[in-house]
Image (cartoon, rainbow, N blue to C red):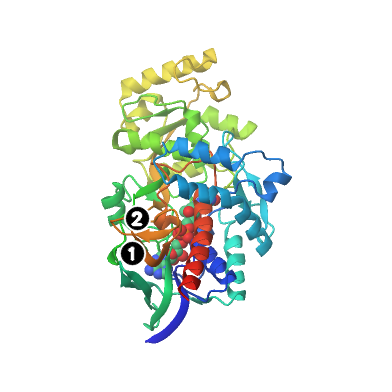
Amino acid sequence: MQKLTADIGIIAAGPAGLCAAVAAAEKGASVVVFEKAANAGGTANMGMGPLGLESRQQKEHMIGITKEDAWRTFMNYVHWHSDARLMREYYWKSGDTIDWLEDMGVNFFGPMRYSPDSEQTWHVVQPDDGSRPGGRAAASMTKVIYNRAVELGVEFHFGTPVKKILGDKNGVHGLYAVETATGEEYELESKAVIVCTGGFGANPEMVRQYAGFQTGTDMFPLCGPDVVGEGIRMAWEVGAKHGRMEMEGIDGQFLPMQTYHFMDLFTQCNLVVNKSGYRICDESVMQNTAIAFKITDYQQDKIVWHILDDKLVKYYRKHGLDIASEVRHFDPTENFEESIADAAENYPKYCCIADSPEELAEKMGVDVQNFLETLEEYNDTCDANFDDYFCKPRKYLKAYRGKKWYALAKTCGAYGSLGGIKTNWKLQVITDEYKPIPGFYGAGTDINETYDGTYMFYLPGNTMGFAVNTGRMAGERAADYVFDQE
Ligand SMILES: Cc1cc2nc3c(=O)[nH]c(=O)nc-3n(C[C@H](O)[C@H](O)[C@H](O)COP(=O)(O)OP(=O)(O)OC[C@H]3O[C@@H](n4cnc5c(N)ncnc54)[C@H](O)[C@@H]3O)c2cc1C
């Protein structure tokens, strides 16, 4: 057993843990970080960037959204069913955190929107290989934060999951961790502990028990395999209160997205029906993936069908997509016919090709008569160029007149989970009696119960933003706590 000592022990080196480590070390605290994976960055290595409000970049680009406006919009969106003080702390710090990251060496491509109706709060990272930002751009950010932490003397142990938080509800005093490859045991004695293990999104049992979804059936989380709720369980063991737990919902794919590049064709605001064969919304609202999640979650068996025909495919091939992806930079019409034939063969329950709408409805397993009526009504709507029923914008009204028919089923997905460990707005982990556990802090997804059901995509970058800002704040507060004890 190796015995270590430090002012602060941090569980995990995702964006929350990394920012906590840098912030605490900048204040002069000694820090040891145990990370289960072989490298730093966590789930953020799959993403594009955090939210910031009133950052230098936004000011330079004359982007006028204020923290006051954003905070009020956010709080209204979540029905104020959230910690308004914590959200205020986060939003008021978020612009400065973007500047702090920039000063550290992070290159931001610029503040971007997620969809036309969202604000330019998403500070997308410029990948260090100079490529156009896409999925995984933020890996270049976590690398910079990690290097800064090393420069400040933070000690990292990779491939070494924490197994136990030492202490109880009267105070925590260290961590017990075991290196996976060698079995080497570590006991860290520390004055404070920060937990930020990224939630429980990859733990099907916790997803079922605490969020009510069946992974692989009606829930397809995108997060990596390491986030299985270990920090949450360990925090509960020392007396932390259970926090609100939900999924960070987005629309979910039955088919592997890496294999089938045609997915974006099906999300071009065309006709979407439920299992009864009825239209369910103005389909253009589904370009916001969090809204698509909610709509889908509401339907029978949590399934919706996106409909296409060969004429529409031809249209997009010629004119380009109505809704472009910021993440996937390829042409979804390329090899469409071969690719969808392959998908229909391998995933016949979720991807169908037919020579007529009747045949398509039968293959989808939706009510044939309802589907035909829906289609007729939808085509009339498109011909009239006016959606009297769901008020869909005219530019998306494209009638179905093709010879080949395609359908793709979607269900619920998630970036990962949200919440589990209850903290107060000072990021102190609290007991059932709402008393802070001395020396115990939390940050990032493990404590993120700010949403009331879904990710708030009108202010994109909100969860990585929550992670980097609560990580930074927890690091600062833990360091202050340590120095107050001396
Ligand atoms: C595909 C994808 C794209 C995304 N894009 C964006 C985006 O552009 N903007 C945005 O705002 N959000 C985005 N997100 C969400 C964002 O990545 C997360 O909100 C953020 O990474 C959470 O940070 P975290 O530090 O709390 O946890 P994580 O980043 O999940 O890190 C948790 C870390 O804990 C480690 N760990 C787990 N258990 C232990 C243990 N027992 N001991 C030690 N270490 C442990 C894990 O290995 C991991 O490194 C995206 C998510 C996904 C899946």
Q: Mark number for residue 235?
A: 1
Q: Secondary structure at mark 2?
A: loop
> In the displayed structure, would residue 180 be above or below residue 253?
below
Q: Position of residue 163 (x, y in %)?
A: 34, 73
> In the displayed structure, would residue 172 be above or below residue 354?
below
Work out whether mark 1 precedes mark 2 in sequence or the reverse, and give the earlier one: 1
Query: Three-letter amino acid code at disc 2?
Result: Gly
Depth check: 346 or 236 in front?
236
Q: Which residue is mark 2?
A: 420
Depth check: 380 or 239 in front?
239
Q: Residue furthest right?
A: 60
Q: Contact, CB < 8 Å: mark 1 with mark 2?
A: yes
Depth check: 383 or 2 in front?
2
> In the displayed structure, would residue 69 be above or below residue 56?
above
Q: Quadrant of residue 114?
A: top right
Crowding at dot 2, Cα within 10 Å, few <14 / some 14-19 / many 20+, comes out as: many
Image position of 162 (left or right of 156): left
> In the displayed structure, would residue 400 be above or below residue 485?
above
Q: Position of residue 130 (x, y in %)?
A: 69, 58
